Image: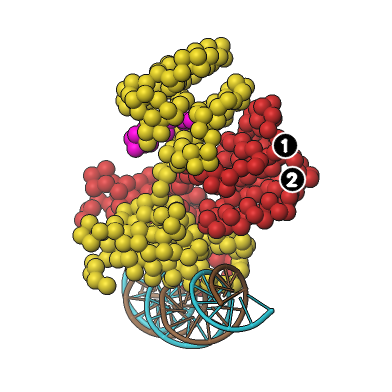
Chain colours: A yellow, B red, C brown, D cyan
Amino acid sequence: MRILLVEDEPDLGTALKDMLNQHNYVVDWVKDGGEAWNYLETKWTNYHVAIFDWMLPGLSGVELLRRLRKQNSPLPVLMLTAKSAVEDKVTGLDSGADYYLVKPFGMAELLAVIRALQRRSPELAPAKLSLGCLSLDYSNNCVCVCNPEEGEKEVPLTSKEFQLLEYFMRHPDRIVSRDQILSQIWDWNAETMSNVVAAQVRLLRRKLAQCGCANPIESIYGLGYRFDSHPRLAQDSDE
Amino acid sequence: MRILLVEDEPDLGTALKDMLNQHNYVVDWVKDGGEAWNYLETKWTNYHVAIFDWMLPGLSGVELLRRLRKQNSPLPVLMLTAKSAVEDKVTGLDSGADYYLVKPFGMAELLAVIRALQRRSPELAPAKLSLGCLSLDYSNNCVCVCNPEEGEKEVPLTSKEFQLLEYFMRHPDRIVSRDQILSQIWDWNAETMSNVVAAQVRLLRRKLAQCGCANPIESIYGLGYRFDSHPRLAQDSDE
DNA sequence: ATAAAAATGAAAAAATGATGAAATTACTTT
DNA sequence: AAAGTAATTTCATCATTTTTTCATTTTTAT
């Protein structure tokens, strides 16, 4: 099990490396952000886990994370920093960290976190959901259509519309039944005689049309709906 | 995005549920460990993330985790508890938690952690049933003919066609009577003077021909049909 | 050649989904 | 607390697709 440790404080770095070595990890210790990027850019597959300090000479830990995730690397990353403010934790996690641990911490804790990271699936889903010309904006509850000619167009979504669109975008190119949708997004068991789903689909289609997207929700008679994995702009981009 | 929240304190539970709802999560809030296990034992696939308190009536959060992991469920779990000792964190994480968050915490932090966990939850691959050049795509209700020269060709099926083809593909190389089919796919007792089976067989044959497959459904005079276990491409792959 | 069985095309029947408007519910703002 | 607004759901109706029937033609086994 090979770990990339990026930490500029000599004392802590030495302590960590020794401790990890003692627990049978192979550790590459790098003290500079830029140097770390040299290791990561092409050779992140060599590692099973990475540990980043935030403040580093060269590139910061957050910057390393961003670059790594931009390359779609699924390498599990643990942020290990003195920055304990909630905003910092949010920034770190949203930049793609899998765990945020504040200094000082217990060695046993660090080891447990590393074990937890190792267990996790090596797959990494994209942080923000976008498909074709559509992207879902989690922070503003809206859908965004990217139109090369007219620029971006945003439309706010209601809560149900958002949940429905999210479900569709996470299950593109496959038929999803009304019952599946009903049980995922509503708290009802299937076999409820209701057409809420149809009604919400209609509302969602209207919103998507509003921002110039051709209807990506195909109705499959008797089965449900299928969401196109490559939503396109509507032909007549009027309105 | 559906979350199972297991928390017995009414105030915190309400606050969490409301807050998560506001961020477009569908939340099932359960206050008792035993009840939570009822949800999880068979239906953990319904959820994308779970949040466990440690101390609960019924089963503890750690016990829930152990049982869940014993079933090999990969559901991302966040432990949310007041126990802040390093040994507790280690116990929680080593029982299978993916993240350990100590109360009190910032809501923004919790949300960021949930987003981080979501990124690690993989999708399941869609199922297919194949026989010779044919394969039946369950997620899109279509039949797919694999043609080495022209690539794959897909044709969507209606639900009756799909059911019929599935029945044939699961019982290849043996004679199946109309009555058998009738009682399997239609819920009718035999001796119903009806032509439905023949009619659907005709529709199905047409669909298969459409995608370049030689008729694999042989009619056995007086007995029924026999489906070839090695469906072939049609000679003239025109059309 | 003949009678039974199966295939066929067209049309009827049934099932399903879309839709607009109205009713209900939830949420905000006085 | 009340009024007003927005969101969600229901309902009735209409359009579409699938499924079944029916009358006829074709095929099969004797």
The chain containing the residue under callout 1 comes to B
Which residue is found at the position 54% from the left and 43% from the top? B109
* Magenta segment includes A78: yes
| Disc 2 residue type (three-letter) | Gly
Q: Is residue A129 above or below residue A92?
A: below
Pick the front one: A115 or B22: B22
Which residue is found at the position 61% from the left and 61% from the top? A187
- Mark 2 Cα shell of 10 Å, populated few (<14), some (14-19), many (≥20): many
Name the residue tied to disc 1. B63
Q: Earlier in the sequence, mark 1 or mark 2?
A: 2
Q: Position of residue B228 (x, y in %)?
A: 41, 49
Residue A182 visible? The answer is: yes
Q: Which mark is residue B33?
A: 2
Q: What span is in magenta?
A: A67-79
| Disc 1 residue type (three-letter) | Glu
At mark 2, the secondary structure is: helix
